[in-house]
Amino acid sequence: MSFSGYKECIEEGDTVILYLNVNNMYAIKAVPHIRSRKGKLVENVMQTTCGALNVRSLIGRRYGHRAPLSRGGWAIPLHPTPELWTRTLPHRTQIIYTPDISLIVFKLDLNSGSTVIESGTGSGSLTHALHRCVSPNGCVYSFDFHPLRVETAKTEFLDHGILYDEKDESNGTVRVEVRDVCKDGFGLEDVADAVFLDLPCPWDAIKHSTVAIKSDGGKLCSFSPCIEQVQRTVIAMNSEGFVDISTVECIQTDLKVASRIMPDIILSEDENVKGKRNADETEIQVQQTKYDHNLSFLTGIPPNTQPGHTGYLTFATLPPKRLISKNKKDQKT
Amino acid sequence: MNNRRLARISRKGYTLLGRDSVSLEGVIGCSPWTNFKMTPQVGCKGGKRCFNLEPVIENEVISDEEVNEKEILENKDNRTINDDGQSQSLSSTEIEALRDEGLSGKEIVNQIIAGSATFDKKTRYSQRKYLRKKESKHCLRERVSVRKTTLSSIAEILCSGGTGEGSRGGITGMRPDTLSQMLTALNIQWYCSSKSADVTKIQESVNYQGTMYIVYESSNWGLLVASLLNYLPAQNCRVLHLYPGHGIPTLIAPKALNLPDGKFSILSSVNIKALLQKLGKLSNLDIFSQNDAGNENVSKLGKSDTNFSSVQNVCDNKVDQSLDGNENGSTEGNDCDISIPGDTCKTDGSNEDKKVCEKSRDEEVSFDSFKSDEDNSTAKSVKRKAESIGDCADLESAAKKPRWEQEAEKAADLLKSRRADGLVVVASKEHPVSLVLALLPYLAPSRPLVVYCPYREPLLELYAVLKGMEPWVGKCKIFGSRETLCKMVNLRLTESWLRNYQVLPDRTHPEINMSPVGGYVLSGILVDHNDI
């Protein structure tokens, strides 16, 4: 339940991000017991590379305060955020990563109270970020044509407290549904401020998006890995009356901060060295490279390899619908 | 997309499109997306041509996009075209003269085509490119469209519009994608830990339970403040905006968002030194010792005061009262279609390439004065500030206290009772190390720190200090003990790369120009090493 607002202490059932080090983070559920493979209820003990952790001991502990591991190490239970979740979630599909998510949320002009549609749901990486942005009063519709994936996502969203529930007026905003939006449309009319498409054939969903977007207009974004998909999508957007169509690609580079030392080789002789040279040439040279001319500096080193392509993001704006219909008629005549 | 201006709509307002000045009076009362024709005004202002805006009835949506049809391959290439400068018989001055004669843009374009000896030899792509260049050079399109502002459009305009050589205006190198990454790292979200329904009571009490963010922003046109106000609802949140120096920095971006008045009640702008002094971190004497700078500010703010009166006049004539009644932060049920005086709209001019945001510069109205009536003259409060050095400890004269001191006291009380849910420092002018070390004690555990800097080196140093690396830790003055160090996890220094694409049938490629740098961001999560 911990995705809807910060809490001070970990409560039973919370999703917690267990931080061991930069490369080892795990999303776990704070429950004292789990079912073993044989179906027996056993104590929930998590084995990490730095020792075992009794998950029961986390309950009641404050977020951000470290917890001891059996082998003397520490683990830090962090409050889950959509970004930490994106880094630790179980992959059921390809997921959209944080730099793209940032740009999508930003350029779709969402804020608290907006209504946004996404398709497909996938592993729910973007869904968490959309929920954070539109809550408490907004609404996220999430569609996927894969029934099992929708079921799993639903359970997960319920678990995280972001699933919309008619009976309970809590902070959930997400509604998930099985639906082939390319074939059947969104089943929604004039409701959305923005539509996001992550589909193999996004061009088939553009006309349905036009229907779903509010009559005052709205935003559309499509994520596609291939430029051919982008080309077809842009043509579809154009013929539906979208304007301000722009395609971008965004990559974030992590710089590793490190202190480095480079010896400075002396290639010109200064006066002092010249005088002493005859006395003991070799000694002076050794001293120089070892002590006098080691230059240390702080630097940010990019990784050797990093993802160079995730997908193209195509953004477009739908003008108020009263203007488009006229436009289209004009084009036909 | 490229020719956008941010303009505050008023009866006397002007915006600059290239060398032409355009009166904004005609926009008042029109709905967003309306197209306007630029009609020449009689008489010139300082050699500039002036235009009025006249709404166009035909509702075609203006956009820069080319027609997206596949074209037939032509049997043309540039083998017969020589770059001898002789192909266009009309000179620039002749074209200007045609314009001054009052010929319409279309007529001039036809003349340009007729005057070009090589136009017919060019391929269609090349013809279109040629005309686009000429149109933008001589401002021939004469069409303007008005749109509503959004956070992303404001960011795009402010980030690309330069007001000085070499810098990207007041934004100091921050690109919108970098901004978006900072906002996600900051995990801006709403919550209320108290279940009680009486929201206003909670907000007023000292033990305030909602979301609270600290943002240090000294220039940047208030883009981070605007972002927080944009994403947070109008209740149960608090945005603490810290600034150095005497006057509150001009918050163009938050004002341009056209937020309902209620939204601004969650924002308080506090001088960082005054705040730290109230928190017992700085001695009295440290504050406002730079009197010279103070005097400068007085005169500058005095100027903006006159601006305020003009805006005020316009606001009095307000045709639509909806802004006043709109407290809930939603745009629904509120006739936002009508741009009213004092409303900020985005002008989508289709003219020149030199992007100078002069309009916005002129309209630098002190935020304080725009917001409320009580003590709205910042100039006055600055003067008082200068007088009241040494008066700070005098707690009994609460009624006489200047506004900045009241704000600082309120903020200090808040920070004594609780810690923030996020800390963002925009270190575009000031070095980040001292700022971050001074503010980090007021961040709650498991909450994010985000620092922006246009340069890489200060953030490298900050990283080294936060990691407790010698000798960098030894070099800096640390507030209190070294407890604030070695408490960050997931500390990352990132750089963003963004590329725009031209997508057209058979002509898809990355755009010719791109921004090679968008600033650097250091982000991390604060943890507590107490084992409880």
Image: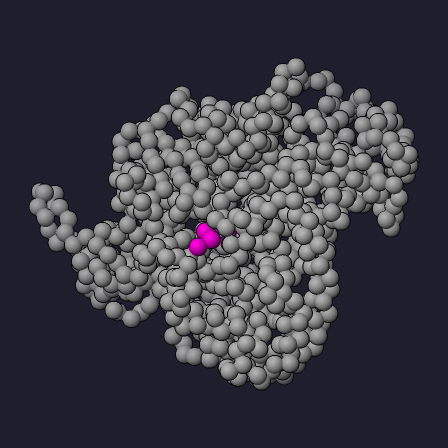
Colour mapping used in the image: one colour
Residue at image point 57% right, 31% down: A320
- Looking at the picture, tell me which residue is in the foreground, B291 or B507: B291
Residue at image point 65% right, 24% down: B67
Residue at image point 27% right, 40% down: A167
Q: How many marks?
A: 0
Residue A211 drawn at (x, y percent): 48, 26
- What segment carries the magenta color? B229-235
- Compared to residue B344, the image places residue B509 above or below, namely above
- Looking at the picture, tell me which residue is in the foreground, B390 or B200: B200
Residue A190 drawn at (x, y percent): 47, 30
Residue at image point 72% right, 56% down: B310
- Looking at the picture, tell me which residue is in the foreground, B31 or B324: B324
Residue A135 drawn at (x, y percent): 40, 46
Magenta-span inclusion, residue B248: no
Residue A177 appears in view: yes
- Compared to residue A241, the image places residue A44 above or below, namely below
Magenta-span inclusion, residue B230: yes
Is B453 left or right of B295, judged from the image as shown?
Answer: left
Residue A264 appears in view: no
* Quadrant the C terminus of chain A occupies: top right
Residue B519 drawn at (x, y percent): 56, 55
- Looking at the picture, tell me which residue is in the foreground, B335 or B423: B335
- Compared to residue B358, the image places residue B239 above or below, namely below
- Compared to residue B384, the image places residue A100 above or below, namely above
Is A212 left or right of B458, judged from the image as shown?
Answer: left
Is B18 left or right of A269, judged from the image as shown?
Answer: right
**Which of the 4 image quarters holds residue A140?**
top left
